[in-house]
Image (tube, helix red, strand yellow):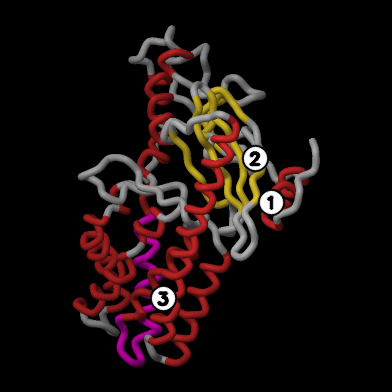
Amino acid sequence: MDLLTQGLLGATVAQTGAKQNETRIAAIVGFASGLLADADVLIQSSSDPMLTIEYHRHFTHSIFFIPFGALLAAFILWPFMKNKLSFKRLYTFSLLGYLLSGFLDACTNYGTHLLWPLMQERVAFNIISIIDPVFTLALLIAVVLSIKRKLPTPARMGLLFAGLYMLVGWTQHERAWDVLQVAAKERGHVIERGLVKPTLGNVLAWRSVYQYKDNLYIDGVRVGLFDEPKFYTGESVELFNPEQDFKYMPRELALYKDIERFVAFSDGYVSIHPETPHILGDMRYASKPLGVKPLWGIEMDLRNPQYHAKYKFYRDLSKENRQQYFDMLLGRELKAE
């Protein structure tokens, strides 16, 4: 998730293990430790742009790395904390702060290498958005109250709320998936593989992607907490297959290898940009909830395949895209395009 939420979760968990009058320092240590897992974003290469996304949310998010990540956090913080805490106590707070960092990111749709090195695939539960103001605000309130009252109880209540919110997200995910399966069946489609993921900042409006034969179908599902679900028909696009679409390109070239890496990173949900044929996009993400224009992708110089691809973002905050998002969020009928 976003860095603020990562830090607040670390602070909250650290406070649950604090004694009276330790909640402030536990929050500081936990917040810093909760952020450390995302330091893998610093792994970059000017000659290989794909290296960043390949190692972001990688080994630092593995459950097996937790004790080492906590130890690293404790060593970094020790010069600032040695007059306030014993190293043992500092490590305890660091361990608690680091503990759920990887799991939190695994709950989003981006996923993490949660079980590395036993499993190389990313784990993504798709039950919460990478930015969720309700979840973040609850953690913030819990941390502040624990500091003010100098007790761990508010932090424990905040952590309980966070767990219940994840349970709501899981329930909403299952409801959205059920709606999608019914809709696909009515189309005469058999879902070969697919996913549903929450749109930005909520657990009500969901973007769905599924493969049927050689196409990807993008739709939306609105699952309210108390009202009937609503299905929104979206767009479709041809699935990209490097072995067929670029069969003429030698596999030892840098560009072809980058394409394979991007396909693996995107879990195979990739397609050529509908308006720009030299852009390969990740169809799991788009600025428009029901659209096929990707939020990010790689730019391929097909005339010079010996060079690496460029990783790019394509944010589009147009009025049309924002309107579709809010219409889905509020369960309204979409305007005809």
Q: Residue furthest top?
A: 248
Q: How far is disc 3 from disc 2 in space, using C-alphas?
A: 34 Å
Query: In this orientation, which residue lies closer to the viewer: 215 or 271?
Result: 215
Q: Quadrant of residue 256?
A: top left
Quadrant into which the C terminus falls: top right
Q: How far is disc 2 from disc 1 in space, using C-alphas?
A: 10 Å
Q: Which residue is mark 3?
A: 160
Q: Are marks 3 and 2 in contact (CB under 8 Å)?
A: no
Decide whether residue 22 is among the magenta residues. Answer: yes
Task: Name the residue at 35% across, 43% down.
Answer: 122
Residue 46 visible in the snapshot: no
Identify the disc placed on residue 151.
none
Q: Which element carries disc 1, helix, strand or loop?
A: helix
Apparent side of residue 79 relative to residue 125 in the rendered image (left or right): left
Check the image and report above or below for 129 versus 249: below
Q: Which residue is mark 1?
A: 328
Q: Position of residue 85 (x, y in %)?
A: 26, 82
Q: Position of residue 186 (x, y in %)?
A: 59, 35
Q: Which residue is mark 2?
A: 290
Q: Residues within 10 Å of mark 2 (few under 14, many from 20)?
A: many
Task: Name the residue at 52% across, 41% down.
Answer: 181
Query: In this orientation, which residue lies closer to the viewer: 54 or 237?
Result: 237
Task: Name the residue at 48% across, 42% down.
Answer: 195
Q: Which residues are magenta?
A: 17-38
Dot 1 or dot 3: first in sequence order is 3
Q: Residues within 10 Å of mark 3 (few under 14, many from 20)?
A: few
Check the image and report above or below for 81 versus 2: below
Q: How far is disc 1 from disc 3 in space, using C-alphas?
A: 29 Å
Query: In this orientation, which residue lies closer to the viewer: 74 or 112?
Result: 112
